[in-house]
Amino acid sequence: IKDGRVAVDAHDADGWTALWWACYYGYPERARVLLVEGSADHTITNGGGETPFAMAQRQGHEGCIRLLQVSESELIHWY
């Protein structure tokens, strides 16, 4: 991810990125890696206009919700 050979914001036919999938399944550590190491864009919306944050809320994944609420400087140290 760090070397830029992975397109972290690439999306599937429904507009879901890797960050989207991490928030859907409730994997906050994977989401953190995408955000910190891959500079994933957390504002990208899917075909229905929802953000990864909205998905995490809908799925009830508190770890992802908290992750997407912290500041960029806090994110680096978030576990």
Image (cartoon, grey):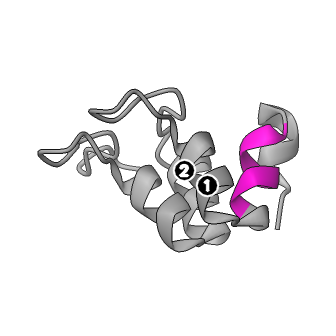
Q: Secondary structure at mark 1?
A: helix
- Crowdedness near tag 1: few (<14), some (14–19) or many (≥20) residues, C-alpha within 10 Å: few
Q: Is residue 15 left or right of residue 21?
A: left
Residue 11 image point, x, y percent: 22, 43
Q: Quadrant of residue 47?
A: top left
State how far apart marks 2 and 1 are (Cα). Answer: 5 Å
* Label total for image: 2
Residue 17 image point, x, y percent: 33, 48
Disc 1 marks which amino acid? Arg
Is residue 67 a member of the stretch shown in magenta? yes
**Which residue is located at x 30 percent, y 47 percent?**
16
According to the picture, the residue beneath numbered tag 1 turns out to be: 58
**Which residue is located at x 80 percent, y 39 percent?**
69
Disc 2 marks which amino acid? Met
**Residue projecting furthest to the left:** 13
State the residue in front, 17 or 72.
17
Residue 61 image point, x, y percent: 69, 66
According to the picture, the residue beneath numbered tag 2 turns out to be: 55
Q: Is residue 14 left or right of residue 35?
A: left
Find residue 66 and name its label. none
State the residue in front, 62 or 37.
62
Residue 66 appears in the figure: yes
Residue 37 image point, x, y percent: 54, 50
Q: Is residue 62 above or below residue 17?
A: below
**Which residue is located at x 68 percent, y 52 percent?**
57
Is residue 66 a member of the stretch shown in magenta? yes
Where are the magenta residues, as a range? 64-70
Dots 2 and 1: beta carbons under 8 Å?
A: yes
State the residue in front, 36 or 41.
41
Q: Is residue 11 left or right of residue 44?
A: left
Q: Main secondary structure of the magenta part?
A: helix
On the rendered image, what quadrant is the N terminus found in? bottom left
